[in-house]
Image (spheres, grey):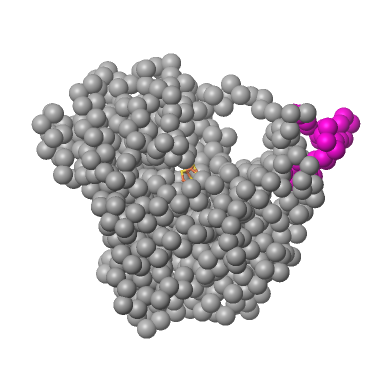
């Protein structure tokens, strides 16, 4: 495979060398399977294929020659809208399932049943409880945890009034806008089941009404994300800046390498705690450097943010981790863990360990997390990994050398803490002053996945350099943040190299005030995908301080390599939150002019935000910069 072909798959040199190794060994990866799927179904790409009832599948002829209606009479607009809102419901179910899991853990922890999950951040517990309207006076941690967990669990089912996690964390202006449109979600599960109901055969056939339903469900997704962040911070600690290294060079030949993959910290955080106590066991088995934990995808982000576990690789390159030949165990929870991993187990010694009852993979070993005995489960899993170390196949070992320094851990609290070093009375003032004086032109939140259809990380890296040059402050989460970590872009050196003068001056002033002897990293890594809620908290604080709503701020978002249903639901709530939101992959909506028009134009009138679909990363930057400048004009700055 020549260099050009490799760079069309990934721009990461470690990934390229592992793709090459896979090819030499005759091993199939995600890119080979994408190739075998060509040409992909054009009807599916346009969103005009309907499989909702058994009279189908039906598809609408985009050239307007053949069928224009499905068997039931649904046209392209209805079919595209139904498919899209079902994807939003899928994303919402995933994010909120993660949050619900943590709510159950907090509930049992408060009752003394899950002893391995004490409250780690009582301050955050108090802050969340107060925000939810709990009288916190004189209550101890257990009482507060019980009330927060009860309120969290109540947020899932049918309930009177708005969802608390959505309504208490956005601006009043947003709540008013959502109320006017009738899209305020109540229970999260109710919102999901409402979408499944209204997209069932013969229910909602009005595409605009369906899309409004999608907005409502996306706000339930937002509530689930925010709850996921809040509860994880309460149980495992609120992140503060950490320095570590990223990319495959963090693997160690003489250590038991355990990759933590998926999304939820419920098990991975415990593994981090227990592994620290089992280093000698690994050494006794011949691993002279003990246990080396590494992170993948959003579970990786969770343990990076709280424990500086080095991120290894992300999203489309997850199989390549195993192809290094030194992953002794890959421990997975749920979401974004591809079944393709199991296909590698015949060739490599890696133990693929599934741990959640809802996420098993044929061929993997299942060691289920029992939260009543979480430390013991973690210990068993680590022992399995240590045993696996002895089964390495030396001829398969090839660790790419490249790794880069990465600074992460920028929770809202950490960002406000750093700004508070500049102005302790009014931490937001330095940020707002610099937005007003133009040192910071605007803010862009980079989120979302890699997508095998896009050269891995190409859009992320191209865009971030261009925007930073134009003095846009960059926040990042998910696999996007992971990409930036692997290329050394989460560093002060990147600020010095790529940031425009204004941005550089601000990041330097804050970094020096915070005692870093240099600038803050060019990109602030805020965590996993549910942690996009942290970016909302910062934006809401700025909006409230300025006395304007979110749709007036020079703040934009981008998912330049979006892939999952979760990315669709996050994108939809970012738009609903008032943000111009870029997507760098064509979503399956082009089969309906009406749906495409609503998403890219009409939503601007309804909620202030809108989608920008642009596959060229530099053109996308132009459009985002234009959107930021328009917002600045609107604010007269
Ligand atoms: O939740 S960015 S590939 S890992 S979906 Fe998945 Fe996408 Fe990565 Fe995190 Ni988010």
> In x, y percent, where is residue 549?
60, 73
Q: Residue at coordinates 57% horizontally, 80% vertically from top-left? A: 547
Within the image, what quadrant is residue 63 found in?
A: top right
Q: Residue at coordinates 41% horizontally, 36% vertically from top-left? A: 357
> In x, y percent, where is residue 263?
42, 45
Q: Residue placed farthest to the right in the image?
A: 65
Q: What secondary structure do most residues of the magenta stretch adopt? A: loop
Q: Is residue 236 visible?
A: no
Would residue 247 appear left or right of 93 to someone viewing this image? left
Q: Nearer the viewer, residue 123 or 602?
A: 123
Q: Nearer the viewer, residue 407 or 1?
A: 407
From the viewer's perspective, is residue 103 above or below residue 283? below
Would residue 159 appear left or right of 41 to someone viewing this image? left
Within the image, what quadrant is residue 42 found in?
A: top right
Q: Nearer the viewer, residue 618 or 173?
A: 173
Would residue 252 appear left or right of 620 to someone viewing this image? left
From the viewer's perspective, is residue 208 above or below residue 14? below
Quadrant including the C terminus = bottom right
Residue 75 is inside the magenta segment: yes
Would residue 508 appear left or right of 171 to someone viewing this image? left
Within the image, what quadrant is residue 111 found in?
A: bottom left
State which region is magenta.
56-82
Q: Residue at coordinates 66% horizontally, 66% vertically from top-left? A: 178
From the viewer's perspective, is residue 333 above or below residue 116? above
Residue 522 is inside the magenta segment: no
Q: Is residue 264 visible?
A: yes
> In x, y percent, where is residue 526?
42, 57
Q: Residue at coordinates 62% horizontally, 48% vertically from top-left? A: 193
> In x, y percent, where is residue 247?
35, 41
From the viewer's perspective, is residue 385 above or below residue 549? above
- Total labels drawn: 0
């Amino acid at each position: 495979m020549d260099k050009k072909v490799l760079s069309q798959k990934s721009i990461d040199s470690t990934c390229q060398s592992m793709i090459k190794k896979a090819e030499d060994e005759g091993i199939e990866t995600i890119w080979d399977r994408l190739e075998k799927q060509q040409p992909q179904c054009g009807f599916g790409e346009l969103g005009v294929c309907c499989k909702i009832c058994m009279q189908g599948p039906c598809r609408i002829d985009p050239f307007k020659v053949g069928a224009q209606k499905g068997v039931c009479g649904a046209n392209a607009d209805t079919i595209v809208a139904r498919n899209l809102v079902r994807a939003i419901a899928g994303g919402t179910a995933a994010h909120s399932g993660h949050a619900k899991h943590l709510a159950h853990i907090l509930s049992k922890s408060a009752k003394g049943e899950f002893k391995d999950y004490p409250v780690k951040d009582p301050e955050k517990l108090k802050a969340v409880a107060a925000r939810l309207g709990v009288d916190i006076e004189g209550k101890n941690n257990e009482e507060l945890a019980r009330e927060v967990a009860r309120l969290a669990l109540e947020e899932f089912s049918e309930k009177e009034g708005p969802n608390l996690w959505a309504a208490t964390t956005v601006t009043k202006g947003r709540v008013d806008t959502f109320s006017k449109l009738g899209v305020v979600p109540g229970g999260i599960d109710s919102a999901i089941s409402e979408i499944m109901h209204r997209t069932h055969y013969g229910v909602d056939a009005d595409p605009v009404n369906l899309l409004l339903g999608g907005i409502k469900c996306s706000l339930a997704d937002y509530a689930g994300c925010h709850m996921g962040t809040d509860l994880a911070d309460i149980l495992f600690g609120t992140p503060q800046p950490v320095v570590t290294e990223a990319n495959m060079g963090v693997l160690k030949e003489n250590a038991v390498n355990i990759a933590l993959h998926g999304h939820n910290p419920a098990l991975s955080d415990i593994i981090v705690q227990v592994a620290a106590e089992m280093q000698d066991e690994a050494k006794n088995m011949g691993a002279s450097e003990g246990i080396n934990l590494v992170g993948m995808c959003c579970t990786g982000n969770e343990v990076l943010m709280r424990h500086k576990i080095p991120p290894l690789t992300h999203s489309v390159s997850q199989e390549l981790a195993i192809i290094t030949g030194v992953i002794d165990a890959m421990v997975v929870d749920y979401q974004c863990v591809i079944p393709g991993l199991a296909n590698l187990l015949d060739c490599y010694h890696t133990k693929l360990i599934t741990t959640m009852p809802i996420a098993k993979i044929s061929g993997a070993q299942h060691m289920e997390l029992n939260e009543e005995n979480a430390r013991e489960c973690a210990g068993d899993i680590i022992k399995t990994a240590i045993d696996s170390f002895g089964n390495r196949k030396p001829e398969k070992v090839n660790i790419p050398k490249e790794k880069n320094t990465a600074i992460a851990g920028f929770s809202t609290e950490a960002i406000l803490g750093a700004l508070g070093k500049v102005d302790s009375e009014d931490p937001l003032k330095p940020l707002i002053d610099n937005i007003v004086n133009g040192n910071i032109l605007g803010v862009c939140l980079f989120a979302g996945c890699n997508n095998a259809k896009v050269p891995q990380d190409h859009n992320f890296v191209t865009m971030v350099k261009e925007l930073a040059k134009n003095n846009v402050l960059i926040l990042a989460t998910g696999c996007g943040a992971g990409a930036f970590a692997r290329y050394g872009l989460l560093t002060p050196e990147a600020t010095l190299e790529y940031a425009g003068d204004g941005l550089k001056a601000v990041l330097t002033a804050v970094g020096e005030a915070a005692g870093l002897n240099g600038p803050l990293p060019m990109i602030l890594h805020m965590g996993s995908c549910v942690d996009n809620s942290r970016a909302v908290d910062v934006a809401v604080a700025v909006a409230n301080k300025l006395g304007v709503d979110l749709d007036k701020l020079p703040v934009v978002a981008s998912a330049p390599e979006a892939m999952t249903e979760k990315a669709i639901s996050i994108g939809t709530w970012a738009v609903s939150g008032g943000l111009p939101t870029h997507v760098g992959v064509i979503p399956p909506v082009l089969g309906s002019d009406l749906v495409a028009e609503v998403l890219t134009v009409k939503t601007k009138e309804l909620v202030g935000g809108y989608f920008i679909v642009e596959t060229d990363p530099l053109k996308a930057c132009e459009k985002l910069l234009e959107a930021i400048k328009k917002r600045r004009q609107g604010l007269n700055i």
